[in-house]
Image (cartoon, rainbow, N blue to C red):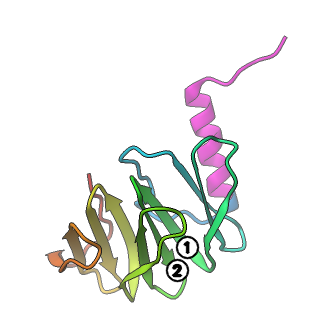
Amino acid sequence: MKKSLTTAALAVLTATTLTTTATAVSGTVSGDGGNRIAVIKGDGSALVKEGPLYAPWTVEGDSVKQIVVAGDRIGILKSDGSALVKEGGLGAQWTLEGDNVKQLALSGDRVGIVKANGDAYVKEGALTSAWTVEGDSVTELALS
């Protein structure tokens, strides 16, 4: 007889697998609909697939420590502290959103970053929109 995993058991197994194979960064949970899956491999390469679960992977970057997907946006935080976001298809061009970043967040048409010094910024609309300071001494930023 085959046994199936419950949703809760699968979530625990997935979380355990992710935390044992890579260092997680706070605020990496994303959503806003869409049909993308994003992963960071042990070598720091970021891959995204779009569409069905068996769709092919597309390499989106290397030396990545955080990846976020939300709707038609993909964001990566590289090991050097640079935060990049793209909008549209998997082959879209990257927009540099900031340097010295320790966390990146996406939700809808908002982009948020926490800089290494703890300053938090959020922008709304186009990727080239102006930043609004949301706080200082911030340790984690979440958008919804």
Decide: few, some or many residues near mark 1? Use Cα within 10 Å; few <14, some 14-19, many ≥20.
many
| Callout 2 secondary element | strand
Using the image as rendered, state which of residue 79 and residue 23 is in the foreground.
79
Nearest to N terminus: mark 1 or mark 2: 1
Q: In the image, residue 122 lies at what x, y percent?
A: 22, 71
Q: In the image, residue 13 lies at what x, y percent?
A: 65, 39
Using the image as rendered, state which of residue 120 and residue 46 is in the foreground.
46
User: Any magenta on residue 18?
Assistant: yes
Q: In the image, residue 17 lies at what x, y percent?
A: 68, 49
Locate residue 16 relative to residue 109 in the image: left or right.
right
Please name the residue that numbered disc 2 is placed on.
Answer: 78
Q: Amino acid at mark 1?
A: Lys
Decide: few, some or many residues near mark 2? Use Cα within 10 Å; few <14, some 14-19, many ≥20.
many
Q: Amino acid at mark 2?
A: Lys
Q: Residue at x 57, y 45 (%)?
A: 51
Please name the residue that numbered disc 1 is placed on.
Answer: 65
Magenta part of the protein: which range? 1-20
Q: Residue at x 43, y 78 (%)?
A: 84
| Callout 1 secondary element | strand
Q: In the image, residue 1 lies at what x, y percent?
A: 85, 10
Instruction: Determine contact: label 1, label 2, CB under 8 Å.
Output: yes
